Image (cartoon, coloured by chain):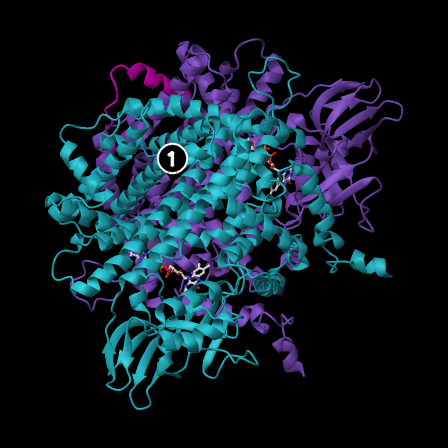
Chain colours: A purple, B cyan
């Protein structure tokens, strides 16, 4: 295997290290190698038994790792970026996961100063270890439907937290099952018999010494899952548990303990902001998530040989590397292009998000001077308008990006044939652990309704003749203006035209949906399938546009040399034309392109791009710079020693091989004394 | 949950039991319930710890179950169908799996009378327990590339079996890792220094008493996999191991020990037949495999309520069952239709296969009389012609059907939202165990080349003006005849036209591919992607045709009442039109349908069919008649007690809940003494 990968690397002029730097920044790469060295020295992070251990053992190890990580953090004075980097290298969810993310973030963002002192500070020191308990057995997506109640008791200024039904049991809560002693609990606030909707409460749930659940609280782990088994997702039930006034997180809304009155939320758009940020992070990570699978499969398919080429002249020819088969290329290379596309899109989202946060802060200053914004349409406030756009975009892209990664990983696994099914491939477990990303932070199907709602709103505004204030409105108004002239996009030769064709299709679908909803008065439910397609179309447009803009950026031309840039440009075209071809039917119904163009894209352009990119495949995956330790994959080893590693793991590390069975059906003996035990005698 | 499912059942007039009988036959249903009762009485088949146990424990239990199953088989005098039925109810691969399938089948089919006596008889009594060792670390699909050698030693009339390289290690071999003491080993036969290609040898590999590997043989389990962990897939290496002359299975080819000459294979088409049979079985099972996921998801989505309808008039309206959302329907109901489509197709294949075996037997009789068939084209022999058609069809359908089931199961899991990710959903593990079906018996991508090769050959024959002798040739010649008149299929209203449109598209793609290959002289490799599409198109045509013919059959109209038949007809249309819409771009490029028709199919016909089928969904899944014991799913319970069961399993059966952790990062303690232990004090 080694020679083959060396040959591959010799064949291409792609500048791996410049591309790595462009993808991850110099600081990012240095950080990774610094942290990797630290982790590899610690025995507890040794991965060699990961694929063998059962649930309880894996959880125990994960807890040990979480503790050690926290110790290293303190010892080395790590930043949060350092910690995040360590988590990525370790690549398994751990029992402090929700403490370190949602619990701290929620306390920070939604608590007031007093609550920061009371809860956040001990939490930052791991005296309190928390989780975020929103979802219930009966409700996930529909947060307004949560059944847990928090009733204000004016007599003693407390809340009673209660779980009135079985389905009100908190469920799926990460870090809760065995680890946490505190929880942020989302509960329906009741005040004077009236419901005020779900609000967050900080509740102690286990004794800080004995770690047993407090009185009238039932907690447990919810059991094994398809993946994510190093995390103790848990359930939680309250039997009329009283908590003090300070428990209700009071930054945005609160109860005045003197008047017993509810104080309304001030600026919900900041919470909105956090959701947008979380989703943008998912988009940003999806490229790397997929790149792991693509790296493994591309390396293995370059080492794997199977069959001679059918048209080979001489019967002596060596077997072909399977990556030379076009049917393997069409599965892997568009995914390779997708990794870059998603990564650049995530970056673009993050940049927009940060720009907007700055603007929001500035507007907030102005707002304070001019008082209330008055009754004008929201659209006149450019930052809130941008936020709405960002929010919708992040919903659509989160949905598209996470499914693309999920489906792409399975495609990579398959490309490895039988060996892809072994855990040593490193793809299966990674896939299984990543899978819930499609469900949390908004079920991927549900999110598309938000995108559609936003696009319909934008289309209505454009139809009214309002001046476009963001890109979405611009492409819609562009479409309206040109609708009658028709489109004649030259997608096969002009990059700008590719971007425009994607914009055209998205706009076409938007106005179609608007017609159904506003003119034909169709029910919302009857349009959900159209909305899904619309969201997908719009998100693909965003990805194509972000990839295109990255290629136009001065940064890329200054960092990458022309041969590398040329390959990047081919990856752009491959992503775009392959997507266009996959979604052909929407492109031609919208008249964005002709049937003939799609045929040509399929039979000529895409096939030619596969051929052109093929020689650079190994260097391109190398540029993602995954350490072998992170991939933990026999098939994806950077030195190509695939078979040696498979054999080593199976024969040396596999505990089942210590067991001798009695194979005969009539014998009641299953396992004879273990060989290990025998050796002891 | 219970009331909701009861309401669903009350709402529809589909005759569940008549439909069950039509799907499974009366005898099949009776068998299932008889065997289920027996299994449920045996403690070893208790499933309650299945989702919790680790690999070694699961394997131990699986071995115990395999033994008990064999005992029951003897005790009750079961038939093979009974055993097969028991396996399906247990739903986990077991350590005797390959012994009971490929090992016995190969001995039976490829051994001569002497070998039957020497190997098959003790194997049938489980004195020998075997496996089928073909795949190696370095070669799977390309059997000709196997590296294990079997060299004939004329001096002492033995063979030397040898593994010359690391990559020649047998790998993936089911039942080998810990259980088998015999193996059928595929090895390259060498005779007088010349290679004769791969041949099967029966080799003892472990001592019958100690169960230790025999001298110069290395064996082990290959380690954990994405699924299939109750099976001990193994590796096997030989260091110049001598075996007697009788070891080479001699029904089709052999070595004459006196002359040391190789005796050529007589009738390879019988082996061909076994492969076709195995693939047809996969097609037949795929409908039921998928139906498990569809049953679970459909029941859960009928019990799950989330959100009020957005257009609901009153805010008091109860939350909607999620199956009422069209975006859930479009994911589940076409899959429900697919279950039936695949099941009927599998049946059709099996019937053809059996008819052909009878014909073959008859032809063989004739052949014996008339001597050799002479130099005429193969096409003149109708049974071999049918066999070629069957073989190609089974390749394409195996590929389509197994991927459809794999992807459909994941779709069902997703439809269940967060709870789909719990092992208690019963979908994830089922999916993981089924997944390798896409790889074994021919990698699903590779198989499509065989379909294409066959279709090209058929097209050449038709172009030459030969009279069509089977359906494939008929549709190709039909297409040729009408090509210039064009097609005007009325797919939206006429069922026959739907079938013809599918035939048209498949024929169109065949002649396109032929043009590329024969006229443009394109390389085989450059056409693999086209071949994949072609195979898929042809296989979808077969499925549509089989579903259509089942609906035309007298059997169905005599067994099902009109309301049930009407729903079946809608399922046919849903499967066909949804597929047509998904593959739209091929249908319009081939001019089988117009762009307008596809738009109408999507926006009108399919949406209307969802609405029409929706009320019958629960009864339709009920008709698949999966016992709860078989599904082992909280979400798929036939009584709808979804949440109660989730809670019970998490809180009562989950061993992780016996553990109390020490949560603080600075404490070296991970697990405090277990509660169970404490209780003992
Ligand atoms: C591994 C994992 C970890 C998690 N960790 C946490 C955690 O730490 N804290 C926490 O609070 N939660 C957590 N969750 C819960 C997660 O946030 C929810 O599962 C998610 O919000 C989806 O909700 P649901 O499961 O209720 O799906 P549902 O809303 O019940 O969806 C079921 C199905 O119905 C469809 N559907 C529902 N409503 C509609 C509609 N209006 N229109 C169309 N279709 C609809 C959905 O698309 C889906 O197919 C976790 C989940 C998982 C899997
Ligand atoms: C769970 C499990 C159980 C098994 N049990 C057994 C058993 O009991 N006995 C046994 O002998 N075997 C067994 N196998 C092995 C199985 O039969 C092989 O894995 C299968 O034949 C695929 O071969 P491969 O893994 O070598 O894939 P490869 O042929 O190496 O395929 C790798 C990739 O290359 C592609 N490819 C290869 N050649 C070409 C080509 N010419 N054109 C285009 N693309 C190509 C494939 O599509 C695939 O994507 C088992 C496998 C599994 C996963």
Query: Given the image, what chain letter belongs to the residue carrying mark 1?
Result: B
Name the residue furthest bottom. Answer: B155
**Residue A495 lies in the magenta-colored region:** yes
Q: Give the quadrant of ligand 2.
A: bottom left
Asked whether the viewer can see residue A24, the reply is: no
Q: Nearer the viewer, residue A194 or A612?
A: A194
Q: Nearer the viewer, residue B374 or A38?
A: B374
Tell me which segment is drawn in magenta.
A473-497
Q: Nearer the viewer, residue B354 or B246?
A: B354
**In this rendering, would B646 be left or right of B190?**
right
x and y, in percent, of residue B518 in the image: 13, 48
* Rendered image quadrant of residue B665: bottom right
Q: Nearer the viewer, residue A599 or B278?
A: B278
Q: Quadrant of the N terminus of chain A?
A: bottom left
x and y, in percent, of residue B94 in the image: 54, 61
Q: Residues within 10 Å of mark 1 (few under 14, many from 20)?
A: few
Residue visible at 51% across and 44% down? B26
Q: Quadrant of the C terminus of chain A?
A: bottom right
x and y, in percent, of residue A10 in the image: 29, 61
**In this rendering, would A173 be left or right of B211?**
right
x and y, in percent, of residue B587 in the image: 27, 32
């Amino acid at each position: 295997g080694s020679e083959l990968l060396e040959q591959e690397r010799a064949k291409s002029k792609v500048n791996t290290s410049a591309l790595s730097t462009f993808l991850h920044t110099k600081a990012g790469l240095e950080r990774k190698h610094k942290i990797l060295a630290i982790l590899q020295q610690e025995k507890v992070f040794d991965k060699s038994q990961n694929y063998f251990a059962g649930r309880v053992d894996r959880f125990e190890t994960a807890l040990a790792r979480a503790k050690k990580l926290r110790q290293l953090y303190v010892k080395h004075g790590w930043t949060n970026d350092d910690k995040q980097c360590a988590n990525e290298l370790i690549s398994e969810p751990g029992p402090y996961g929700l403490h370190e993310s949602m619990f701290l973030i929620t306390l920070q963002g939604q608590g007031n100063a007093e609550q920061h002192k009371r809860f956040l500070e001990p939490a930052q020191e791991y005296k309190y270890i928390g989780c975020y308990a929103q979802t219930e057995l009966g409700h996930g997506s529909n947060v307004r439907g949560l059944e847990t109640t928090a009733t204000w008791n004016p007599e003693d200024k407390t809340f009673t937290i209660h779980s009135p039904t079985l389905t009100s049991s908190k469920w799926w809560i990460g870090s809760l099952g065995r680890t946490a002693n505190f929880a942020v609990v989302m509960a329906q606030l009741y005040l004077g018999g009236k419901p005020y909707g779900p609000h967050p409460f900080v509740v102690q749930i286990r004794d800080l010494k004995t770690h047993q659940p407090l009185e009238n609280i039932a907690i447990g782990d919810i059991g094994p899952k398809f993946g994510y088994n190093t995390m103790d997702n848990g359930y939680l039930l309250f039997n009329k548990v009283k908590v003090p006034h300070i428990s209700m997180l009071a930054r945005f809304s609160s109860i005045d303990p003197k008047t017993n009155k509810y104080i309304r939320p001030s600026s919900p758009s900041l919470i909105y902001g956090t959701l947008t940020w979380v989703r943008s992070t998912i988009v940003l990570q999806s490229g790397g998530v997929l790149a792991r699978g693509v790296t493994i499969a591309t390396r293995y398919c370059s080492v794997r040989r199977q069959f001679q080429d059918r048209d080979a002249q001489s019967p002596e020819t060596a077997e072909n590397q399977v990556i030379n088969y076009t049917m393997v290329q069409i599965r892997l290379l568009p995914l390779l292009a997708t990794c870059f596309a998603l990564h650049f899109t995530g970056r673009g989202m993050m940049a927009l998000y940060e720009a907007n946060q700055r603007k929001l802060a500035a507007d907030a200053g102005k707002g304070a001077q001019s008082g209330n914004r008055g009754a004008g349409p929201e659209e006149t406030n450019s930052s809130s308008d941008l936020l709405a756009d960002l929010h919708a975009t992040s919903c659509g892209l989160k949905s598209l990006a996470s499914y693309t990664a999920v489906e792409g990983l399975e495609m990579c696994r398959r490309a490895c044939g039988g060996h892809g099914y072994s855990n040593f491939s490193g793809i299966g477990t990674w896939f299984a652990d990543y899978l819930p990303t499609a469900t949390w932070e908004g079920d991927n199907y549900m999110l598309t309704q938000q995108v559609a709602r936003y696009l319909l709103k934008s289309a209505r505004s454009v139809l009214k003749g309002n001046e476009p204030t963001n890109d979405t409105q611009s492409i819609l108004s562009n479409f309206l203006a040109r609708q009658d002239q028709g489109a004649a996009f030259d997608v096969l030769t002009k990059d700008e035209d590719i971007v425009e064709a994607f914009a055209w299709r998205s706009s076409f679908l938007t106005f179609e949906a608007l017609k159904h909803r506003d003119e034909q008065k169709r029910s919302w439910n009857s349009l959900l399938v159209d909305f899904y397609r619309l969201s997908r179309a719009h998100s693909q447009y965003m990805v194509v546009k972000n990839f295109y803009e990255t290629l136009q950026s001065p940064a890329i031309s200054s960092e990458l040399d022309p041969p590398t840039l040329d390959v990047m440009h081919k990856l752009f075209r491959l992503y775009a034309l392959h997507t266009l071809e996959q979604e052909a039917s929407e492109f031609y119904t919208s008249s964005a392109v002709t049937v003939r163009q799609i045929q040509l894209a399929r039979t000529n352009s895409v096939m030619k791009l596969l051929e052109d990119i093929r020689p650079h495949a190994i260097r391109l995956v190398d540029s993602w710079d995954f350490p072998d330790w992170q991939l933990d994959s026999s098939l994806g080893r950077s030195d190509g020693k695939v078979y040696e590693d498979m054999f080593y793991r199976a024969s040396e590390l596999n505990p089942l091989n210590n067991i001798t069975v009695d194979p005969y059906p009539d014998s009641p003996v299953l396992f004879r004394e273990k060989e290990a035990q025998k050796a002891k005698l």
